[in-house]
Amino acid sequence: MIPPIDHTPMPRDEQPVPAARPPLAAVHRVSLAVPALTSTNALCETETSVFSAQPSAERHGADMVPTAEGPHMDRSEAGTRRPRTVLEQQIRQVRRLTLNEFVDYAERFAREHDERGTLSLRHLERLVSGRGPNGKPIGRPLPATCRLLERIFGMSTEELLSPADTPTDNSGETELRRMIRASARVDDAVIALLRDQLATIRRLDRQLGALIAHQEVLTKVEQVTGLLGHSVTPRTREQLAALLSELCSLAGWQALDSGRPMDAWRLYERGKAAARESGRPAFEAYAVAEQAFVLLDIGEHTNAVDALAEATTTTGKVCSPLLRAWLSAARGEALAAAGRHTESLRAFDRAAALASAEPPGEDGPYVALDAVHLTRWRGHALALLSAPEAVDVLTAALDQLDPTFTRAETALRVDLTAAHLVRNEREQAAAVAQRAATLAAEIGSTRQQRRLFVLTDRLSSCP
């Protein structure tokens, strides 16, 4: 018998993308290509915005920073002195960057987003000071430079070059008004753009894994959280809340795949809260079901079965047949983990019937559940149950699986390794495990690597 193995949630990935997968060594940093933004929706730029998470990578530069007032300024002094312009405030206090670091960042941003604007250190020093070489107020930069700065910060050039607020007991009022004004610019076009960005991140995630895409998702989570938290329009809040729920669910799944169940749990809690604010039961049911996979991973099988049963029954007819099929299959996996063979297969039979009921709608959380993915999911449950027929089911799914679903293929191969071991097919198990180990390392799937460690240890101890 094989020791218990971890449990792999089924696909939540997206539409096909080109099958070619670049070697991991060639992927240094993936940047999302999004349509050029106008001044109206510039706040939604993927790289960063007034609400984006603080950049945490690719920073460099000495602790001594050149300034307009003198040859150098210590980093700590630059971070504590009063900023002269909003631009300086955004760079030093919000992003915690030196001017040197920001020049490097702006150069990368321009290159990755096809912007023609350039920014030298000397030019930036003049801009943040608000004064030209002769002490007179600085003029407006070139249009290309203006566009570059506006895309980075999501603010107009005039606002960036205006004097920074003087700190007072009520200094937060100005920032609050600015955030409320920014959120007020969110319209249907901005919501559509944010959803396009989520779709792009999903495609990266399913093919390259959390190793590449996780930070992108966390950035969007904080960005949309900021927009939601400062929006005063009910309809806009509902749309942002539904989007935030899906972002948190994706980030939670990435955290779970990276071997961090506590982080995953917290992200799913945020996703459930956002789903409740959206007023859409389908999104809450999806977030609850996703969180149940954390319970499966830590051995809380009974709690997972109960949570999925509740999510399935309470949603009733408000969910699309496709989502109800996904929920039924998720419950089937939990039942398999709990060793309830007959109930598990019945749940998968119900999922198959629901999935073929009608074409999927768009008003609900995204799920990928075609015939191939459902077969793979059923094969996973059979592997959990140590059923000999799991090999045939999983092999059939592998033959038809879209090769861009790298994480899905990795999990499938781990399941197939376990299934071969049940049938004492050691050579086949070893070959499948070797490929699974390569894929797991490439996408940074700690979860699958842990499963493989148990299985390969068992393989090496077989007579």
Image: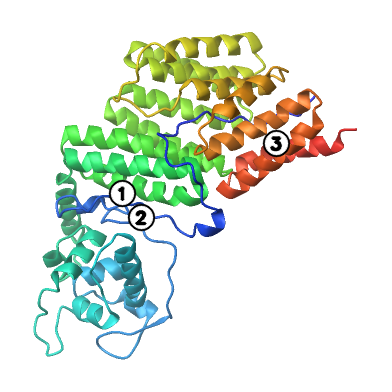
Q: What is the CA distance from the residue labelled 2 to the residue labelled 3? A: 40 Å
Rendered residue at 81%/32% (across/down):
426
Q: Amino acid under label 2?
A: Ala
Q: Amino acid under label 3?
A: Val
Residue 232 spot, x, y in % from top left: 16, 40
In terms of sequence position, does the residue under pointer 2 or pointer 3 come before the other? 2
User: SS of the residue at dot 2?
Assistant: loop
Q: What is the CA distance from the residue labelled 1 to the residue labelled 2? A: 7 Å
Please name whichever residue, 39 or 299, is drawn nearer the observer in this view of the structure: 39
Please name whichever residue, 79 or 141, is drawn nearer the observer in this view of the structure: 141
Please name whichever residue, 205 or 270, is drawn nearer the observer in this view of the structure: 205
Q: Is residue 331 above or below residue 15?
A: above
User: SS of the residue at dot 3?
Assistant: helix
Which quadrant: the N terminus? top right
Q: Residues within 10 Å of mark 3 (few under 14, many from 20)?
A: many
Q: Residues within 10 Å of mark 1 (few under 14, many from 20)?
A: many
Q: Is residue 173 left or right of residue 105?
A: left
Badges 1 and 3: C-beta atoms under 8 Å apart? no
**Residue at label 3?**
432
Badges 1 and 2: C-beta atoms under 8 Å apart? yes
Q: Residues within 10 Å of mark 2 (few under 14, many from 20)?
A: many
Residue 87 spot, x, y in % from top left: 22, 69
User: SS of the residue at dot 1?
Assistant: helix
Rendered residue at 36%/43% (across/down):
200
For discs 1 and 3, the disc positioned in front in the rendered view: 3
Residue 35 spot, x, y in % from top left: 25, 50
Tell me, for residue 53, which label it has, or none.
2
Which quadrant: the C terminus? top right
Q: Is residue 331 left or right of residue 101?
A: right
- Quarter of the figure with residue 304: top right
Q: Is residue 180 above or below residue 269?
A: below
